[in-house]
Image: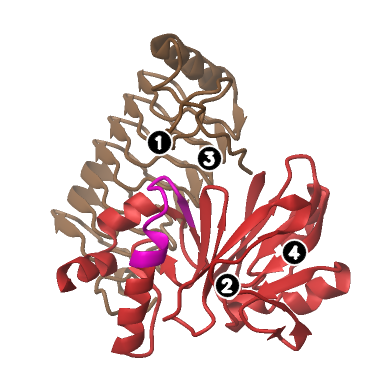
């Protein structure tokens, strides 16, 4: 399995491309924009996008789907049955399915930033969208959502191995060990218990 | 790009080092493996998908190299020359860097979390989207560098210079800063308080 990264200048969001080492059917996580650079990345590595994983519905994470669907006959997976008016396969916490090229995806529901926030666990990586970024938990609208988010991160993500790579929707990558040790939002959770 | 091969040792969560089925801790001859990995890095200018976690090296010349999706985490690098090199989606967390030269490097989407930097020079580098969470930096220089979206949260910085740097979206929340200079840098666009949205 190989991982590629693309930075969308619109919305400052990260898009991830995952596929077999020698090309074939591939996965896109959060296509915030579909631009020439992303198309080049896909085509030069001989990939065909068969699966689009959406962490949540915010526009900076899904805007590229309109263009992508004109090029690739890809299945969209998200919490909601529709993303930008495109039908999506609804998934929920605990679901496991084989995406493009048989790559196994585990779904982890982590509400708080938005009601439809999902994290995708693939291999030794978690694609966290806006749930968890390097050094910070996601933004929330109120203290209840904040508490829900922090508790969900603790209960549903931190049981994974420390070496798990955190690939967020915004900002640099991280590891679960680094987040446990240095993320001040997570330390708030420790002191509140 | 990244090829994920876990160490075959039961219960080990580390990735197998290049050319082996085990991590550096579990190969038959760790010293020989360490020497082989350093030789590979020294002789190969463009490195892709290389896992050389836990290596120890002193005085190596890794200048003018390209590291793409490489894992050099938990290593020890003393007097190593990384100048003019580029790092793309690399993992160097929990490592020690002493007297290392990172001048004119191009680092993006890379993780240095929990590492220790002593007397390291990053002058005139592009260091974007890079994770410096919880690092300990002493006597280091980042002058004339682009640090867009790089994250120094919970770091301990002592006598570190960020003169004339681009700090847009850079993050220094919960960091301890002693004798840190941001002269001529746009520190107004960086984040220093936890409740400030980026």
- Which is more foreground, mark 1 or mark 2? 2
Could you say whether the residue bearing mark 4 is in a helix, strand or loop?
Answer: strand
Residue labelled with disc 3: B86
A171 or B138: nearer the viewer: A171
Report whether mark 3 lies on the same chain as mark 1: yes
Q: Which residue is painted at 24% across and 58% down in the image? A: B154
Question: Residue B73 bears which disc, if any?
Answer: 1
For the rendered model, the colour scheme is: by chain
The reply, left or right, for residue B74 in relation to residue B193 is right
The quarter of the image holding the N terminus of chain A is: top right
Q: Position of residue B189 (x, y in %)?
A: 36, 73
A29 or A150: nearer the viewer: A150
Q: Position of residue B102 (x, y in %)?
A: 40, 37
Compared to residue B172, the image places residue A87 above or below, namely below
| Extent of the magenta region | A154-166
Question: Residue A55 bears which disc, if any?
Answer: 2
Q: Tell which residue pokes out farthest to the left in this image.
A: B178
User: Could you tell me how far apart the alpha carbons at marks 3 and 1 are, in whole angstroms?
Assistant: 16 Å
Residue labelled with disc 4: A51
Give the drawing colour for chain B.
Answer: brown
Please give the letter of the chain rendered in red.
Answer: A
């Amino acid at each position: 399995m190989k991982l590629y990264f693309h930075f969308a200048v619109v919305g400052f969001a990260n898009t991830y491309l995952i596929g077999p080492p020698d090309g074939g059917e591939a996965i896109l996580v959060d296509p915030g924009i579909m631009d020439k650079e992303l198309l080049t990345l896909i085509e030069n590595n001989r990939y065909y996008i068969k699966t689009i994983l959406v962490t949540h519905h915010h526009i900076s994470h899904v805007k590229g789907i309109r263009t992508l669907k004109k090029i690739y006959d890809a299945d969209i997976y998200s919490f909601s049955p529709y993303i930008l008016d495109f039908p999506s396969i609804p998934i929920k916490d605990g679901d496991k399915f084989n995406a493009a090229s048989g790559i196994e995806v585990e779904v982890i529901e982590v509400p708080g930033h938005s009601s439809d926030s999902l994290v995708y666990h693939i291999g030794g990586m978690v694609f966290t969208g806006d749930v968890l970024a390097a050094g910070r938990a996601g933004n929330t609208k109120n203290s209840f959502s904040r508490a829900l988010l922090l508790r969900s991160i603790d209960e549903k993500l931190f049981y994974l191995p420390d070496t798990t790579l955190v690939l967020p929707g915004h900002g640099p990558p991280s590891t679960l060990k680094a987040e446990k040790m240095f993320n001040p939002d997570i330390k708030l959770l420790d002191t509140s218990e | 790009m990244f090829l994920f091969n876990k160490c075959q040792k039961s219960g080990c969560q580390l990735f197998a080092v290049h050319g082996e089925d085990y991590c550096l801790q579990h190969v038959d001859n760790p010293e020989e493996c360490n020497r082989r990995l350093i030789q590979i890095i020294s002789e190969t200018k463009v490195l892709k998908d290389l896992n050389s976690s836990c290596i120890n090296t002193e005085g190596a010349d890794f200048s003018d190299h390209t590291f793409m999706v490489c894992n050099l985490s938990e290593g020890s690098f003393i007097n190593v020359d990384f100048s003019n090199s580029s790092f793309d989606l690399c993992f160097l967390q929990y490592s020690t860097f002493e007297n290392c030269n990172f001048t004119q490097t191009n680092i993006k989407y890379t993780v240095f979390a929990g590492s220790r930097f002593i007397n390291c020079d990053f002058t005139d580098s592009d260091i974007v989207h890079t994770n410096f969470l919880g690092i300990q930096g002493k006597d280091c220089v980042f002058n004339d560098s682009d640090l867009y979206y790089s994250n120094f949260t919970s770091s301990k910085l002592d006598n570190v210079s960020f003169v004339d740097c681009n700090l847009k979206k850079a993050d220094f929340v919960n960091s301890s800063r002693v004798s840190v200079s941001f002269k001529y840098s746009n520190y107004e666009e960086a984040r220093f308080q936890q409740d400030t949205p980026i």
